[in-house]
Image (cartoon, rainbow, N blue to C red):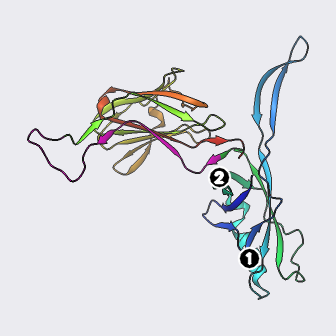
Amino acid sequence: MLIKNLTITNSRGDFITFGQSFRLTDDFELSGLSATVNHTESTSDGSTYQNTVLNNKDFEVPFLIYKTITESWWIEEKRNEAYKVFNPKANPFRLDIETKAGEQYYLHANLEGAPSFPNGFDNSNHSWQKGLLQFSSNDPYFYTKNEIKVDIALWIGAFEFPLEIPEEGIEMGYRSPSLIVNVLNEGQESTGMMIRFKALGTLKSPSLVNVNSYESLKINTEMKAGDIIEISTYKRRKRVTLIRNGEDTNIFNLLDLSSTFLQLDLGDNLFRYDAVTGLDNLEVSMTFTPRLLGV
């Protein structure tokens, strides 16, 4: 991967963008991902394959601090800036990457220590200072920077200017006619998503069903006009939240016991929405970020 720009941001919001005072070295590389293949012993020759687990992505970010002004304190000040931003107590970090082809990705990782400066603070070097960051990512995937949003049920506006109202009236909007939508996952691995139920009026127990697998996700509650329920099905980030009158409430306990935290397989995924009552008052959308093994 040929990297044009890299910005590393800690959990406190502090960040450093490489390209001016801080610069990446030519040997910086983020490719490569190892995996553990699990087998069980067999009574016959060989063994039986069980599964494959991706290992943590361990990588280094070698960089240079360039002295862009003549004052002697410049590099020392930039070292202090690096210590502040690249503080392992501020884990996790987000690395935003732009390639020379113009594609944008990000990944999350944890610093395994403070920045190191292999050649120390060399006063004889008047131009640059070497530095090194060591990361380990327990989520080894890259993610595309822009989320993909898919609407299943929504009202589509039919109102535009200049406006001339005929005697028989005018249609202000119309309901999207399909109860089923195809969500295309063009990533390199299955992924979770954010499901959003929005109530335009009173409805009861909204649900979403995977047409291919018959897996479903259902919330056993009554929604009022303006209510929004957001369900995150991402691994390690599962949650169910009701947003009513601007306030967030955890309603994980209202998840139907037969529910599955729906995932997006590679390729096509067909989903159908439903509600016990008030189906026409329900708007449904899904957002997700494709996961990539490498870029």
- Among the 4 quarters of the image, the one containing residue 157: top left
The answer to whether 171 is drawn above or below residue 209 in the figure is below
Tag on residue 106? 2
| Whole-percent x, y for residue 259 in the image | 50, 26
Which stretch did the figure color magenta? 143-170
Q: Which residue is mark 1?
A: 78
Whole-angstrom CA distance, mark 1 to mark 2, is 25 Å
Mark closest to the chain's N terminus, 1 or 2: 1
Q: Nearer the viewer, mark 1 or mark 2?
A: 2
- Among the 4 quarters of the image, the one containing residue 29: bottom right
| Whole-percent x, y for residue 265 in the image | 60, 30
- Tell me what residue is drawn at x 80 percent, y 52 percent: 59
What's the residue type where badge 1 is placed? Lys
The answer to whether 199 is drawn above or below residue 107 in the figure is above
| Whole-percent x, y for residue 126 in the image | 85, 83
* Callout 1–callout 2 Cβ contact below 8 Å: no
